[in-house]
Structure formats: structure tokens, C-alpha cells
Amino acid sequence: MKFEKLNERKVSRDPILGYINIDYKIIWDLLNSKEMQRLRRIHQLGGTFQVFPSAEHSRFTHSLGTYENARRIVEEVKDVKNLLSEEDKVKVMCAALLHDIGHGPFSHAFESIHPVHHEKYSVQIIEKNSEVHQILKRVNPDFPNDVSSIIKKTNENPLLSQIVSSQIDADRMDYLLRDAYFTGTPYGYFDVERILRVMKVTNNIITFKSSGISAIENYVMGRYHMYNQVYYHPTSISYEIIILKFLHRFKELYLNNYKFKQVPSILVPFFINEDLVSNEEHFLLDESTIIHYAKNAMNEDDLILKDLARRLLNRDLFKYKVIDNEEEIEKIKQERIKNGFDPKYYLHQERPVQVVYKKYGRQDMTAINILTPNGEIKELNEVSLVVKALSQSRYTNKGELTVFFPLI
Amino acid sequence: MKFEKLNERKVSRDPILGYINIDYKIIWDLLNSKEMQRLRRIHQLGGTFQVFPSAEHSRFTHSLGTYENARRIVEEVKDVKNLLSEEDKVKVMCAALLHDIGHGPFSHAFESIHPVHHEKYSVQIIEKNSEVHQILKRVNPDFPNDVSSIIKKTNENPLLSQIVSSQIDADRMDYLLRDAYFTGTPYGYFDVERILRVMKVTNNIITFKSSGISAIENYVMGRYHMYNQVYYHPTSISYEIIILKFLHRFKELYLNNYKFKQVPSILVPFFINEDLVSNEEHFLLDESTIIHYAKNAMNEDDLILKDLARRLLNRDLFKYKVIDNEEEIEKIKQERIKNGFDPKYYLHQERPVQVVYKKYGRQDMTAINILTPNGEIKELNEVSLVVKALSQSRYTNKGELTVFFPLI
Amino acid sequence: MKFEKLNERKVSRDPILGYINIDYKIIWDLLNSKEMQRLRRIHQLGGTFQVFPSAEHSRFTHSLGTYENARRIVEEVKDVKNLLSEEDKVKVMCAALLHDIGHGPFSHAFESIHPVHHEKYSVQIIEKNSEVHQILKRVNPDFPNDVSSIIKKTNENPLLSQIVSSQIDADRMDYLLRDAYFTGTPYGYFDVERILRVMKVTNNIITFKSSGISAIENYVMGRYHMYNQVYYHPTSISYEIIILKFLHRFKELYLNNYKFKQVPSILVPFFINEDLVSNEEHFLLDESTIIHYAKNAMNEDDLILKDLARRLLNRDLFKYKVIDNEEEIEKIKQERIKNGFDPKYYLHQERPVQVVYKKYGRQDMTAINILTPNGEIKELNEVSLVVKALSQSRYTNKGELTVFFPLI
Amino acid sequence: MKFEKLNERKVSRDPILGYINIDYKIIWDLLNSKEMQRLRRIHQLGGTFQVFPSAEHSRFTHSLGTYENARRIVEEVKDVKNLLSEEDKVKVMCAALLHDIGHGPFSHAFESIHPVHHEKYSVQIIEKNSEVHQILKRVNPDFPNDVSSIIKKTNENPLLSQIVSSQIDADRMDYLLRDAYFTGTPYGYFDVERILRVMKVTNNIITFKSSGISAIENYVMGRYHMYNQVYYHPTSISYEIIILKFLHRFKELYLNNYKFKQVPSILVPFFINEDLVSNEEHFLLDESTIIHYAKNAMNEDDLILKDLARRLLNRDLFKYKVIDNEEEIEKIKQERIKNGFDPKYYLHQERPVQVVYKKYGRQDMTAINILTPNGEIKELNEVSLVVKALSQSRYTNKGELTVFFPLI
């Protein structure tokens, strides 16, 4: 099978990667599908822009970046380039571009009122009726499922999934740098160039030559800092809690036949389905609708809905406090009740995990494998003192209980 | 009068300026007002993110940046620091923070269906009932008008307006760098640090020591490149034309009593008023509503509205062509008509000006004044060969006529 | 002919280019030749580090950078890659690496006591007995001359010389960025990546697609700023004048049979030859010897030599003044004489040219040629308003007469 | 006492710090002293530029950077600014500028033939006859000793020494960033701005607010990477071994009354004194003389001296091998002997320590103290999981034995 190329490489400026380079028509078509364009309307980092104001980038640009990283891996990393067929390369690039296509707005919050993981939607959009699906099917009838198998990690060649999602992959290498760039945190930097230069394939597993250990240690530390500084920032969690409570109230009112002045019709399918809604219904859901419905909600009579909508629009967030005894929580609760705040909506507890090296060693993920000069494969923590130290300390830190509530 | 300070300086990370530093309570309160928070829902560069995908930053972060530049000018540039009272300094900082508060979504497009300049709204929000107005009035009853006078350039001390808006000012020094950063264009860089170091006040006019000419030439060139490469990019204009035509159709249908399935109620005040709507009505207008209404519009029966909404959501833009004869335009027009496209909505002509040194010399603006070693003040183009050359060429370039239309 | 490759690509870190990549054994051998290593002992910018203290980089790293740019042009620019044979590619890379090999210490100053242009030495080192020559000759007996023909611009294929030295070439693209990086001037930046992407070959001439004009304008402006800010800085000229006068005195004393306590034996061949000295003699000349001889000179009895040596070591530079009448110069001169300063050594006049667009249009150089979308070739100044403006102004600026002399 | 200020702040461009700012005349005078200017002739990183070619920066620019950091600490860190008198501030700035003034060329190698620590020379230059001493004495007769007491850490106020040299100090904050910049290694970056913002003084000890822990962790990691990647690079050690062996041979020949064609007179005082030479003799020693003497040495008859000189000039370095048994070393040794290489000069063993967190906890150094929100002071490793992990692992890693020898 021969894949159609564009007359001329299309390039798109990108502050992280310099350029996004597109040679294949199928990639260009996917990029212009309505499902991909929808990702422009969803913030990559949910509520983080409430703390780091400039973190306003979307899942669309991250998807482009993931694609470009995947393209570089399959076209520039010699071992990968030589091992994969053109078809597999294109599949990997498609999967990288589409890996986040099922995301909804403020996923963390949203998935608590509609408990379907976004990856299931990514798979449904690729496999069932959608513009994306049509484009993929033009290659051949199996192609959509081949692409989704990479995302589901069921492809017969596990190397394909490793490129898109493992420990150091096209996805993570994009978002760590991108999120650092847009938040303005100077701690997330690492040297992608170097990492790609030392990437090899050994026994169909991605390995890294030991001369690149420093770059990889930097990547691990960059990840640590991004989690510590950015991803688990309590103010950003506080904003997502407002969204969560607002959606909860909306759903509860709807299920209790509340008479809305303006029915939140785009949300309704998500309120009434425990399982996946259709691709058409999913397409309509994005952040603009959440925001718009908050404005509508300010005209409703329900005081809780109104107040949560106001808080969401005007950034009147809950305060947070790290607490280590039940009595104090009870006291905060009683004070809220006394002041007319229903604790169901106005008190929230969460235990954000303080990550050092958490994700390594998860069963479904390949470790970071280092290829030593004499050809052995070792796990990163066998050869990096820093990472070894970090991995030993992983069980010692549990996050502290944090309580969120309105000031009175 | 003594201005209340926060217990401790508040800082916000910013990728362009490092940190936004806030010492005054009034600035902190303004920042948290609902009118300022609304600016998070409006892209700084309108449709530019359709060409430079990462240009997703909002008017909110630009407003913070403008404030921070103004703060540095009044607190760190020795001459300004010594000349201004604390009250004037705070006024300047407020005006800088609020200068864009009247902006609507996609202003260029929007102002063609509701022809009120955004600055008029900025003034109305500051001077009339709003959260912003309440906060300013706490200082004293004249304070809101004092702040708006800086924006209107009617303040008795013209130095205050020069800091916020002149040729090299807190506003421009922020947006050129910020837009370059977020688009990923490496051409807009200049050395703010150096410019602030050479900034002086001579006869109540802002001047720059001639040792800083290179930094200023770089600023002028940076501006030139940003206009050429980014601000006047035809694809971004094409997207704004879609918005414009969509809003036109919406307005026309409304004024002709079209029966909407879902009335675009937030837009209605703007359809029926030629002059300013109220601050409450203005507050509700942002990009989320435009996008949400586009989704609603796809359910209406009107084919033009539906099609334009689809184009807007899915980025199915008009093509553009530089054309220099009427016949070709006529031919394009006839072909559109033959294919059922009403040229009122499906044909648009525009002549984007190719700026080299355009803005200099506008009557309402002070030139860039250079302080020579022997104490004379000269205009930049008297001392910079590059700028002289650019300014001489300003009459020679008129933009080319560009025509926008759908492919058939 | 097949060129021997290294077992594995050798890479060297470089802050400007990321990495210097070496695949061919001949390049690796040349790099390790004693004549190349000698370039580590000569500052790239002569006395500029006296003004921009961090400009301490050597001609060696610039030579590596020039090589790497040439390598990228012949291996990554599609048109060049397809047009040239492997032999021509290797030749170009060798010529790029070796183009500055004939440089001596503080060339500007040195060539005024030994008037042989450094390029003649580059050619002699390549063509006659030297380690470099031996390495080149191993390819075949003509190879050294083939390489030097690129430097002399006599190669039958003029494209080869254009790559190394034209208007936008491997040499200039390296030194502008490198000098900006090491001086810390933020004005010299331009986008090499973009320039390489738009580079084409049309009728055996290097052209640039018009979509790259902004990058090229930036390059031209970067050059302008580097000349204005860095290369012609009078303090750096002042230091070179000290070197010049010191060497002049040394030479004069030697030719007049002065009895040195320590004879400056390495300099002697340059004092007594008007034409080229041998490669062995040339090899010994570098900045360490100039500095060491200055320390020796402080023990000699000649007061002028001693004083100039002290000034050189301890940075006791001449002051400078822009002067526009002869009387003032005469007055300065008489005052020096009265204070015992021989004007031959203690008064120097120079007219540094203020470059805007000077180098363009020199007869021996190809202009910057732009390939328009319809296939025409135009000169840059026909299509760039900025450059046109700059080129029109080139005759209007002559440098001002600057006089250098010691304070009394 | 009032310190004389310059008419106008002098500024010097610096790529790391933007500008070096000088307000005090005494700093300006010290900068222009011959002892400071001599530092331009000594590489900051000794032989590192043999591996990272662009690491050609001198101890002079690092001294400027250390001064500028100290200036910022005493003038911008509020606690320090309020606690110290102007006199103490100036003292600290002088000590920072002068802290490395006693360095010789390739200190590591040089101190093995003349075993006097460079700090002793710094103290002697400050306290005894020198230009630097004269300038300091103008303040008052005790001032030189006051300044040297900061370097010796005997000043009655230990805060002064902490600013110049502790765990996070003016010196280290400069060299880590500067060395990263000039080597081109992207791993050494950390956020000085942030560190200065969280710096406090508690009980006359420098502390850091816990909100800055990420920046400090980054600093610690940056240091780790610089040691691992740059400072202990075996190729750079190999070059210093050549220098060491060359100087050893020179010294041995001299002490054995070898008849030199050209006596290395500047080195002689260092050969014959076990203790400090005079400041005048010290002044003459710099890298230019080492290099020049290598050129002279190539004319001597001693084969070992000649060969080592050639290796030094032409970068014909020793190979290195990590070895873990004595037999292999013995085998290498016998092979060298068989080939005529005297193992005294042609075999060298070294065990470069692999630093993770080595320097912390040294008795003479203050730990990094963190000020927690409730006012307690904790050691960094009590509050940073990463640093705790690193510090636990410090005893586990001893460097591997590395042997250096010529190829045969």
C-alpha cells in the first residue's frame, strides 16, 4: 500500500517544536476534521490557567505536537525507521494525532458526573461514524481499528504503542515541554533532541543508549517539577471543584425535573447516560458550552446553581487548607451549614498525591530501558543514582488531605 | 492620599515578564473583578490561532503584562519615579490594567455589526456602574474619571497617557513580545530591559537616550515583522470574515423577524443598538457565546446561517486571492452565484495595508524622541538610518486587493 | 570515489547549533590537525572581548560552526543535495572547515605590520606542506587544490563557493549568531532553520523562496546591528590600535638592530618578510605569543615598547573622540608631544564605516536572490521594502573621523 | 564612611546576567587593576574547552558575574539590604569580585607542581603589595584585611562570607549558569530570579522561604548535572594530565640543571618555592606563557618534554579506560615501557568522584536552610524529597578508577 503525499510538505509554526511538518494527505485531512478542530475549544490543562494565567493552550496544539514527535521518531530514529513499514509509520502518526480526541472539557471534573474515560471516546470516534473515521476508512476498512488498537495497546506490534504512550513517548515529550512553555515555569525543560539521538530499538523494545542518561534524568526531574508545581496546584484543583459542583447541581436538578428557563440541552445526554453518548452528541460538548451555560444559569432561580455559576465565571474560588484531623473538618462543615452552605456542594476533600517517581513501574507500562555500552538492557534506576534515589522514596510520601470550602 | 498595600507582594508567573508583581490592594481587587475575569474568554489575537495554532492567549494575560510594564516604568524608570505622585502612579497602573476591558470577541468582525469602538466600552465600564467602577470609586469619587482620562488622553498630565499608549509604551511593549512568544515567531524580539534603562523624561515628554537606539530600532523592526507575518495574515483575516458574515446573517435574520429555534439573546442588544449597550449586557458577550451560538445555529433552517456556522466551527475557511483587475473579481462572483452562493455573504474584498512604519507620525501620537548626548531632542528618524529609510518608504506601499470566497 | 566514514557519527556540543556532526574521517582528521588546533589560540573577534568581556570565543569554534552549516546545506537542502556529487560535498565541507585557517592573532592589527591577507595563508596551508595538506592529499593529488579553489572562488562550479562564502552563507550564518551569543547582544538573532528551509538552487545559483523573506530581512538587520554595536565598537578598535602600535615598535626596533634582552623570535620572520612566511613559521604565531612577548617587553629598556606592552596587558587603552576639524586634532597632537608622547605611536586616526547595507552589490559577490512564486528570480531589494530602503541609504553614511590618543 | 560613586552607573553586557552594574568607584578601579585584567588570560574551566570547544570563557567574566550576584544580594534582597551597613555591602562586593584573583593557569595541574592553594594567593594579593591592595587601602588601612577576611571566612560577621561562598552563593550561582551557557549543556539551568526572591536572613543565617524549594531543587540538580557531564569529563582530565606531566618534566629538568635553549624564566620561581612566590612573580603567570613555553619546548632536545609539548599544543591526548583490576594496569604499564614510554610521565591513575550531593554537609559550610511558613528553619533535605533521596545515596557511589595513557 502506498500512502498519498501532499504536493508539498505543509508546515505549521510551533513554539515548542519549531515546525509541525506534514507530508501525508491523511494527516492533513485528519487535522481538518471537525473532531480535531473541536480540540481547539478545550484547554490542555483544564483549570490551570486560573493559577498560571498564560496556560491557555488547547488540546489541539498538544495533539499536533504529539503527532510531530511521533513523526520524528518513525522517520528520524534510525532503528525505528528501519523496522517499521510505511503503513505502520502512518498508523503511529495517526494514533499520535488522535490520541486525545475523546477529551471533554475539564475532564477531571466532567468524568465525575459522566463516568466514561476519555480514551473510550477516542476509540469510539476512530472506530465509529465520524469525520475522522471516514478519513481513516478510505485507506482500507481495517485501518480505523488498526489505529485505535495502538491507543488501546492491543496492536500486535507493541512497539507502535510504545512510541505513542510509554514512559518517554511522543505524548509526554510534548506535554511536559509545552505545559512548561505556556505556564512560564522554567523547571520542565529537557533535551528532546538528545533523547531522540540515543533512542534505539532492542528486541522490539525502545531503549536509550546510556550516553543519554543525563538527558533522561532531566526529563524525569522535569516531570517531577511539573507535577509538583503545576499539575497538582491546589488553586487549579479548586477551580475544577467549582466546575464539578456546578455540573453536579445541574445534573441533580435535571434528574429531579427542575423547570429550567433554558434547558442545558447539550449536557442532557451526558446526564442521562452512564455509558458513552453518540459521537454527534460528544462533538457538541466543549468549554464554550460550559461557560455559556454558566451565564444562562445565572438567570435560573436555584440559588446553589446561580452561586456556583457566578463563582465559575468570576473566579470566586473555594479556599483550601491542609488538614490532619477530623474535628477541624467537622468544625469547618458546621460553620458552612450555619451560614447556609450545603456541604454537599460547598465542602470537598481531596488528597492530591505528591508524585516523585510515581508512574514508573505501573504494570501496564514499559520501564525506561537503558542500553549499556556492552549491549545489556538495564532499568533506568539501576544506572541512574538520582532515579534510584527517587524511586526508593516513592512509598514514603502520601499526599496530605486538603479541604476546599468557601470563605464566610 | 495613601494607597492601601497588600500584606505581601502577590506574584503571578508570566512567561514574557517572569513575574507580574502586585503590591496595591486596588490592583488586586481590579484583577479579581468580573469584568477583568471576562477577558480570559477573549483571544488576544482574534482569529490568528487559526494560522498560528498556539496563539491562544487571551486579552487577560496581555492586560496583566501591560500593567506590569506600567508598574516598572513608574517605579523603576528614575525620571518617571521622581516626577509622579503616588496617586498618579496608581492611576497609570489602573489605566494600564484596564485599557482593553471594553474589548468584545473578534473585535474587528464584531465592530462591523455593532459599530462602537471598544475603547468607548472601556471608558463606560470604568466610569459607570460595574465592579471595576465600584473598586475605583472607593479611592475617591473622581478616581474612576481620572483613570479613564488616561485612556481617553484627556488627563491634564499627558505623561500619564504616554506611559500607557504612545509609540513605545506599556501596551505595545507587552503585546509585541507576547504575540511573538505565543505564535512562535522568532522575529518580534526586542530588548525591553534596555529600553527601560534608557527611558528618560525631558520637558514632560518621554525620551530615550541615544545609547539605546539599537534596542529601539529592533523594536520598530519587531513591530514591522509582527504586522507583516502575523497581524495581517490572510488566513486569519479569512476566519474573521467567516465570523463577520455569520454575525451579519444572524443580525439580518433577527431584524427581519426570523423565527429562531433558539434566540441568540445575548447578541440581541448589540443587533438593535447602534450605540453602547449596558455594562451588564456587555459583560455577557464573549467568545464562548459566539461559539455556542454557532452550534445552536447548525440546528436552524436558514441555509446560509447553518453553513457559516459550520465553517466557523470546523474551520472550513474562504480561500483568498490577490487580484488586480475587476473582471477577475466579477468572474469569481458569477461562479459563486451560479453555485448558489449569495455574494453578500460569500464574497469579500479587503486591502490589508502592508505596514513598514505606518503608525509613526499619526497626529494623535507622540513620536519616538531621542535624547542626544548633548541634550537635544531629535525624532528617531533623524538619528536612525534604518528608521529614516523605513519612514521614507511609507507612502510607497499600498496593500494589494485580496478577495475571499469559498472554493466550489 | 568513495569517502571513508567513521564507524559512528562523532558529535560535539555547540551552543549555537546544538551539535556539530561529523561522519567523514577526513573531517575528523582535519579537525585534529595541528593547524586547526592552533585556531583555539586566536580570538574570533580580536579585541572585542575588551568591550564585551564574554566575547572570548575562538576561531576554532567558528570554523566548526561554518563546517556544520555547510554540512547541513549539502546534506539537507534538497536542491543542493541532489545537484552535487559526494566528492563536491566533501570538498565544500573541507573548505568551510578550513576557510579561516590562515588567520593570525588580531588580524586587523597584524596585517598592518605584515601586509599579507589571511586568505593567502589559508590557501598556502591547504596547498603546501602542512598536516592539513597531507590529510587532503590522501584523497588524491588534486584534492588540496580543489579545496583551495573554493576559497579562492576559482572552482569551475561557482555553487561550491556560494555555499561557503556569498551573501548568506555557511560562514556568515555562523558568525553572526555566534558573535551575538558570546557578546550577549540580543540583536543579532535570525532564523537559520527557516533560511535553510527556503534555500533552493536555480540555474546553479542559490536562491531563496519568497516565503522566507522575513527570515532574510531579519538576517540583514542582524548583520546591521552586529556591525553597528559590536564589530565597529571604538573601544575594541582602541585595543587593536594598542596591539598595532606595540607590534610596530617591536618591528621598528628589530629592523634598527635594537639589542633585545629577549628576542621575539617567533615574530621575526613576519618583520623581515613582505610576503608569506613558511607554514612552520606561521604555525607558531598565535595570541599566546603576543601576550607573552608583551610580558617580556616590560623588561626591555625602550620606554615606548614598555609602555605599550603595559597598556596591552593591563588594558590601559587610548581614549577616542569623534572629531570634525583639523585644528582640534593638531591641538591634541601638540599636547601629546608636550607630554612626551611620540604621535607616531600615540595618535591614531580612523574612520570606521557605519554599515547599513554595505556589503550587498559588491561586484565579486552574488546578491541575495529571491525566487518568486511564479518562478522569477529577483534581487532581495526588489521584493523587500526594508532592504530596498536600506540599500538606498547606503551612500548617505560615511563614518565619522575618530581619533585615538592617551589621556594626559 | 561614605563610598565614592561614579558619576553614572557603568554597565557591561553579560549574556548570563544581562548587565553587570557598577556604581562604586572602588569596584571600577579594582576591575581595571592589572591583577583583575590578568584573569582574562586564564580559562574558567581549565581544559574543558578540549571537550566542549565553546567553553572558552575566562575567570575574568566569572568574577564579574560573582560580583553582580553579590551586588544584587546586598542591594535587592530586602533582609540583607536592611541588615548590612554600606561599608559591609562594599566589602562583600569587593570580596566577590576578587575571590578568584589568586588563580593560576590550569589550577588543578599547576597546584600539583607548586602546591599552594589559589586562595592563599588571593589573600596575598589583597593583603600585600599589588594594585588591588593599593586601591583597597585607599578606603582605610584595615580595608584590605577586612575584604580578605570574607574570603578566609574569618570576618566577625559570618553573613558576609555566606553571601560570597556557602551552598547557594554569589559564586556558585554564577559559575553553574555561566559554565552551562558556554559549554552549551542545557542541563545546568535554574531560576536565580526566584532564588533571590525567596532569600531571607534568619538569626544572621541565610535562609530560603519554602515556596522556593523547586527552584533550589533545580539548582541542586543543575549542579549534579554539571559535575557529571562537564567538570569530571575524562577528556578534560586527560588534557590537564598532559599539562601536569609537561610541567613536571619542566620542573624536574630545571631542578636537575638541564641546559635549556630558552629558560622558562616565569615558571622558575614556582619550581623552586614550595611556598608562595611574590605577587609580581605571580602576576606574570598565565595560560599564554604555558602555551608559549610549550612552543619553545618543541625546540629543546629532551624527548619527553618535546613530546608532551607537542601533545599539549596539538591536542594529542592520552586515552582513558575505567579499570577495576591491578593486572590490567600492570599490563598497560609494561606495554608502555616496551614502547619507550616512561610510566612516570605516560601513565596516570585517577578516581574522579561521581558527585550526587557531595558538597552538602561539609563541616566548613552552612547547609541550605529552609524557612518554613510557620517560621521554623529546616535543612533542605528535611523538606525536599528529591534532595533527601540524593543525600542518602551519597555514600553509595565511589568513582571508578580511570587510567590514562598514550595509544601505541
Image (cartoon, coloured by chain):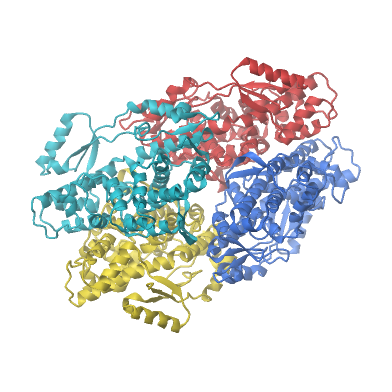
Chain colours: A blue, B red, C cyan, D yellow
Q: Can you say whether D386 is above or below B174 in the image?
A: below
Q: Can you say whether D273 is above or below C146 in the image?
A: below
Q: In the rendering, at what x and y percent does residue A325 appear?
A: 73, 64
Q: In the rendering, at what x and y percent does residue B88 appear?
A: 50, 33
Q: Can you say whether A220 is above or below B39 in the image?
A: below
Q: In which quarter of the image is residue C29?
A: bottom left
Q: Is residue A381 left or right of residue B371?
A: right
Image mark count: 0
Q: Is residue D91 visible?
A: no
Q: In this view, does D72 lie to the left or right of D311?
A: right
Q: In the rendering, at what x and y percent does residue D358 appear?
A: 48, 70
Specify the farthest residue to the bottom.
D327
Q: Can residue B375 be seen in this view?
A: yes
Quarter of the picture holding the C terminus of chain B = top right
Q: Is residue D252 left or right of residue B16?
A: left
Q: Is residue D206 left or right of residue A125?
A: left
Q: In which quarter of the image is residue A201?
A: bottom right
Nearest the camera: C185 or D220?
C185
Residue sitting at 26 percent across and 69 percent down? D306
Nearest the camera: B260 or C189?
C189
Q: In which quarter of the image is residue B24?
A: top right
Nearest the camera: A36 or B71?
A36
Q: In the rendering, at what x and y percent does residue D232 appear?
A: 44, 67
